[in-house]
Image (cartoon, coloured by chain):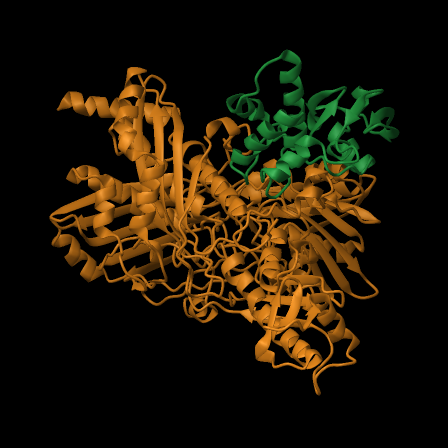
Chain colours: A green, B orange
Amino acid sequence: MTKVNMNVNGKAVSGDVPDETLLSQFLRETLRLTGTHIGCDTSQCGACVVHVNGQAVKSCSTLAVSLDGADVMTIEGLANGELHPMQAAFNDNHGLQCGFCTPGMIMSGVDMVARYKAEGKDLTSDAIRAELEGNICRCTGYHNIVKSIEDAAAKM
Amino acid sequence: MSTKIGDRVKRKEDKRFTTGKGKYTDDVRNDNQAYAAFVRSPHAHASVKGIDISGAMAMDGVIDVLNGTQLTGDGIGNIICGWAITSKDGTPMKMGAWSALATEKVRYVGDAVAVVIAETQALARIAAEAVEVDYEILPVVASTTAAMKDGAVTIHDCAPDNQIYDWELGDEAATDAGLAAATHVTTLDLTNNRLSPNPMEPRSAIATYDDAEEHYTLYTTSQNPHVARLVLSAFYQVAPENKLRVIAPDVGGGFGAKIYIYPEEITCLWASMKTNRSVKWTSDRSEAFMTDAHGRDHVTTAKMGFDADGKITGFKIDTVANIGAYMSLFSSSVPTYLYAPLMSGQYDIQNIHCNVRTYYTNTVPVDAYRGAGRPEATYVVERMMETAAREMGLDPAELRRRNFIQSFPHQTPVLMAYDAGDFPKILEMAQETADVAGFATRKAEAASRGKLRGIGYSTFIEACGLAPSKAAGSLGAGVGLWESAEVRVNPVGSIEVLTGSHSHGQGHETTFAQIVADRFDIPVESVSIVHGDTDKVQFGMGTYGSRSAPVGMSAVVKAMDKVEAKVKKIAAHALEASEDDIVIEGGQVKVAGTDKAMGWHEVGLAAYIAHNLPDGMEPGLKETAFFDPVNFSFPSGAFICEVEVDPETGKTEIVQFTAADDFGTIINPMIVEGQVHGGVTQGIGQALLEQVVYDDDGQLLTGSYMDYTMPRAADVPFYHVEHHETPSPNNPLGVKGCGEAGAIGSPPAVINAITDAIGNNDLAMPATPQAVWRAIQAASKSVAAE
């Protein structure tokens, strides 16, 4: 067991966890932040995407103990009093059905909009589709997810 | 903003999902939680000679290791198939025994032989690795081709040649005569590729036994928690129904894979009693590929005859379907009654004969996956139509038009009585939206870039709204397929609707509320939908077969009829008017043509205060209804796909996809369009990307997202979705169901487009770049040979 300290959604947290504990497990089991989902075991589905030090990361591919002192943002920390524009856009554009992939989609969406804005690049629908290579949805056919991210990008 | 029938009401349930507050089964953790891990066979076919649990039991934190002999010894029954099919020689289907934990034999890779219960999930998995099973490996049949061979190893003793049934529908002699009279006969050999449904939430079960009450609670990822309770009680003898509560909370997609009651749920329930612990199991994706029921897996030869005018004279289909190692809950019905009755498609065909043989193989069970039988039928019909048109030198749309059914109701020769539709109109809508007139220009432009552009059609019909109970029963179903609803008006006028339908992405919390808001003219926010808990909702048959709207909503309408009648009686009494003069509008219950009115909430309050009710009226305002449909509903559609193929690499790009659908009355177009987008994407997945592969030894080669290609965002385009509404006369809302159309209609449209582009009709799904490239080479060779 190793003690790990993080800042998660703006709060200092700590836990004693086995060294093999993944960040996804630490969030779900230790902190009981169950909005981060596990949809595969090969780091491909993206349901577990969170932000670590401001960057989108698949939390199933990172050991919790490697992130001592990190700033982590999960889907639960995204709304600040009111819904984040990306969360609102998913509702406005019917960007979700069963909701299981949604937290990862939203966290990836926020990250890609921020990166494209920082680099001064245009986030076209083709670019959104390419960026979503690591996020799988089985319900929506991506049509309304792409629309949601386009919509949010215009408002962020 | 209006929130009535036909409005694009934003989903009420979204906030919890977009903020991470959804509650899925794996999010539940009980006090005293223990974890299950299954010991699974690495062999596709083997005798179990012994199980040594000593190594696992010696580990700290291992609570128990349980096996199939203990399970059957405690009286837990075998898993059953709930639809009896009779072979054409009159013999019943041959259903082999399926124990939740295998006892003497394992029959597919992943078949569970034991379960470890431990303090943590990680420990349970490590301990499962330490259980030593002595297997005697047997020969394997991993495909229907292998299973049918003379001398093939027997998987179940009750089916010595592995055949489960040899079934037919339609008049073979008349069909043969129709084919003999044809001036042109098209023949195709078609494979419907095996798929894994892959809802993004893996299956999960948490069972808790209360020894004081002798009561079980099961949280599970189910599309139909009441069916689960019924089957667990009546057939598996886990517990009587009043001692078993099944809760399916937020469920992350189903697509058929979460209809069935799997070995894991049964085992967790039983193990919670054995260990007196709450027992939790959550599948990982690898386990899902190995154990979730697969879909499709048909091999078919079809012949379609035409007269000189291009009218169909006969259609004969011979199909071999893979059932897998055991007969799953609806497995027998999928390649029979959900398949052959759709062979008439949208066409007036007098003579149809369909023969289906099913076989056991050493693979995971095959059952319903989005569309269930209807995609397989549509693929056959629509590949035939397109190919026949090309062979006869006719425009594929024109050949379809010549054969369209024009009047309704229409009785086909394969059981179905179509309710309503306008097939020419929908095809015309699709052609306009897809700008078929401009295709030649687009094709020429693509050619200038070195690309092969093709166009493909699919005009299809489904049978949804499963199903009239009596008819289903006469065809072998073990259950009725009605739905129930309870409408509770609270004293303040807010409404709870309890439904046996289950939402796992379909948006029922919004659409079901819309039909209530529409009926009683109250805000949609005043209506809450309760589902997914057998302690709250009395009974229900769940959600599959696009049945929630045509059957589930119809039950709500029936219950609302009763509520409305009582509301009118209460208001008429209080307002000293005739019931016939009472109208409900604008949040009020009024006497028509007067200013006498009560607020909607005042009627609710009056019903519960009960100070001033008509003589003899019971207090309260709550009504229940069961709706049993009189017929299936028949959604139809016309899909047009345009592709560009790179002849150098064989890679296909879907450049345009148009879906024009007739779903009858539409409750919420936004949600209906979402269902079409998702369904079409799964169909494109089947057509281009997805394929479950077992090797000859029965080893699963596509066991993860590394090997099984799921459609990604860049694989699909934005879709053009159109609607034309011909209401179904068979239910009060006129709805037909929209959940499966996309997956049913799209695969043949995609393949027809690719075969058009490359000039070779001989192309199987999935049309991977390699497969398409080979088909292009074959076509150019045959041209060279000519």
Residue B148 visible, this angle: no
Residue B475 horizontal/vertical position (percent): 41, 66
In the rendered image, the vertical position of residue B549 relative to residue B125, given as above or below: below
Q: Nearer the viewer, residue B275 or B398?
A: B398
Residue A114 horizontal/vertical position (percent): 67, 20
Q: Quadrant of residue B442?
A: top left
Q: Nearer the viewer, residue B194 or B39?
A: B194
Residue B530 is left or right of residue B644, and the answer is right
Residue B665 horizontal/vertical position (percent): 46, 56
Q: Nearer the viewer, residue B180 or A150?
A: A150
Q: Nearer the viewer, residue B640 or A44?
A: B640
Residue B7 visible, this angle: yes
Residue B546 is left or right of residue B599, and the answer is left
Residue B261 is left or right of residue B452, and the answer is right
Q: How many marks?
A: 0
Residue B280 horizontal/vertical position (percent): 73, 47
**Residue at the (76%, 81%) spot, across then down:** B612
Residue B276 is left or right of residue B680, and the answer is right
Q: Quadrant of residue B272?
A: bottom right
In the rendered image, the vertical position of residue B367 relative to residue B770, given as above or below: below
The quarter of the image holding the C terminus of chain B is top left
**Residue at the (58%, 65%) spot, across then down:** B556
Q: Quadrant of residue A47?
A: top right
Which residue is outermost to the bottom? B615
